[in-house]
Amino acid sequence: MTMVEPTSAQELWAAEYAGQVPADRVVRNRSGITIEPLYTPQDWSGDRFASDLGYPGQAPYTRGIYPSMYRGRTWTQRQLIGLGTPEDYNGRVRQILDLGANAISLLPCNSGFRGLDCDEVPTPLLGTCGTVINNVDHMSTALDGVPLDTISTAMNDPTPFTLLAFVLATAKRRGTPFDRITGTSNQSDYISHFVANHMFYRLSQPGSRRVLVDHVAYCRERVPGWNPVSVVGQHMQQAGATPAETMGFTLSTAIQYAEDCMARGLEPDDILPRFTFFFDVSISFFEEIAKFRAGRRIWARIAKERLGAKDPRSWRFKFHGQTSGVDLTAQQPLNNIARVTTQAMAGIFSGLQSMHTDAYDEAITCPTEESARIAIATQNILREEAHLCDVIDPLGGSYYIEQLTDQMEEEILRVMKIVEDAGGMYEAVGSGLVQGMIGRSALAAQDRIDLGEDRVIGVNCYRSEGAEGTQPPPYRPDRDAMEAHVEAFRAFKRDRSETEVRRGIDGLRNAAQNEKENVFEKVVDAAISGVTHGEIVGTLRDELGFGNPLIVA
């Protein structure tokens, strides 16, 4: 047998590599893309700099949506907070602001997500996973000392957006003009709830569609600094969609919402600058970076070429990243600090605009004060000590990153084509197509973990019995304080003006029955009149239909 001598350095490397690594050892990322052991100029060349990369703030937007990126302004630290009573929330949010956060986010109690008031739910269930906020008094207490005209607030607020209504009612009490309010309805994406976050899904699919468009129209006119649409990829990725599927579904959803608003007569350049996106950032480091770089340039093309937007602000793909709770483990929970740090670095190198870093104990409980402090410190260390903000898109030009960005873009567009062929995202989720795709991906991922193909430290490898003792106890709010909170709420309902309440509820019903009226405007009016969260949701469920998600076996 005659040996063939390598004729170049690359061939020499390939021969030596093949002699050390079995040929059947194939590496794929979570999106199913094969990852090569080495990338060279044959995979990506600087000759494509102008077409693939360019400069930050310019087409094709691969490198970021602003010219200065983190050199001009770093990402917003927006920690998600939700626990106990409004007083508990207010105490925690003041601590977070003192520690350096410059925006806040509010997570309501699960009872609120289900459309219920606190007096309809057993007290032990209240406040364990979010704050119990059912009326304007609760919101006023939760935001006591928080200047609404300078601090951006994100509300985890599904349709019909009662939390924003209570914020506006609070602003009205304080004399703060609505046009000074900034923030985001970061659970406005009813399609993601229909698909993957059923607890948040309150109104029927057609009813949700109408209320969302009304919400956008109202905010554009009355609360221009508010982002009424946050398209949420997080839910679908946490349900099991691959990173590429997640980006494809999310962009398809954004197209749906934009075209629904345009069918209402809204101009693309009036609404798209206020579109934002909300994503999971998993521990698949390079894949996540490539996902966001690809998504950013796809959205710029969609906004300009398909939706007809002419204002460059409409082309910007602004997104919030939350480190992925799905990657966290209840086993050896302190290891989660390393996972969150890796996820956060992926988000920063992706060029996100705001970020939440999970606390290490979130696989077990509502974060403690200590774990929440470490989560914020993680962002501070990465920004202040690690110098991750010194260079814009520091991985740009890497053979691997550029090739992977191209491959992720191709896979994302393939997913979007499937949705488009099904009639768009609204029709695709109505038929169960999207849910079926996510289910298959979730099952495949779990199989890889069960077979040990994907290794999770402390779960299917490197297990340590002694480390389990570090788990913190689950958070439970003070029982007496919660009972007092519920009793005060009952007293509020007894003492309020029944005439005002009846006027508010009648206004809601009439608006729901009349397509020419804006439903969300009446939600705000009802909140100001003392109508509660449960009453608003209940009234609209009567008129627009109950939110029953589609179950796909």
Image (spheres, rainbow, N blue to C red):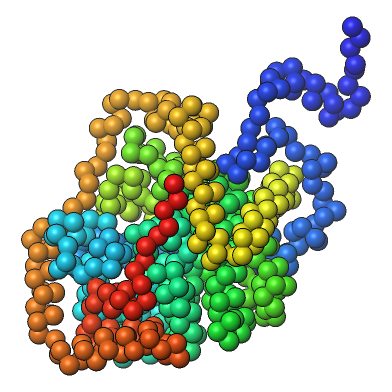
Query: Quick check: can you spot residue 494?
Result: yes
Q: Quadrant of the N terminus?
A: top right
Q: Position of residue 27 (x, y in %)?
A: 63, 32
* Left or right placement of residue 509 versus residue 502 in this view: right
Is 293 located above or below residue 259 in the figure?
A: above
Asked if residue 14 lies left or right of residue 364, the reply is: right
From the top left corner, tell me how far across and down residue 35 is, in percent: 67, 37
Residue nearer the viewer, 392 or 302? 302
Q: Is residue 217 above or below residue 546?
A: below
Q: Is residue 154 left or right of residue 532?
A: right
- Decide if residue 238 is in sight here: no
Q: Identify the residue at image location x=33%, y=83%.
A: 523
In this rendering, position of residue 53 left or right of residue 367:
right
Q: Quadrant of residue 205?
A: bottom left
For image coordinates 14% across by 68% down, the residue present is 119
Q: Position of residue 539 (x, y in %)?
A: 28, 78
The residue at the point 33 percent across, 79 percent down is 543
Residue that protrudes farthest toward the top in the picture: 1
Is residue 369 placed above or below 493 in the rendered structure?
Answer: above
Location of residue 400 in the rendering, given as x and y in whole percent from the top left corner? 71, 43
Figure quadrant of residue 114: bottom left
Query: In front here: 427 or 454?
Result: 427
Dividing the picture into quarters, in which one does residue 262 lie?
Answer: bottom right
Q: Residue at x 76, y 62 (%)?
A: 54
Say which of 102 and 487 sits in front: 487
Number of numbered labels in the structure image: 0
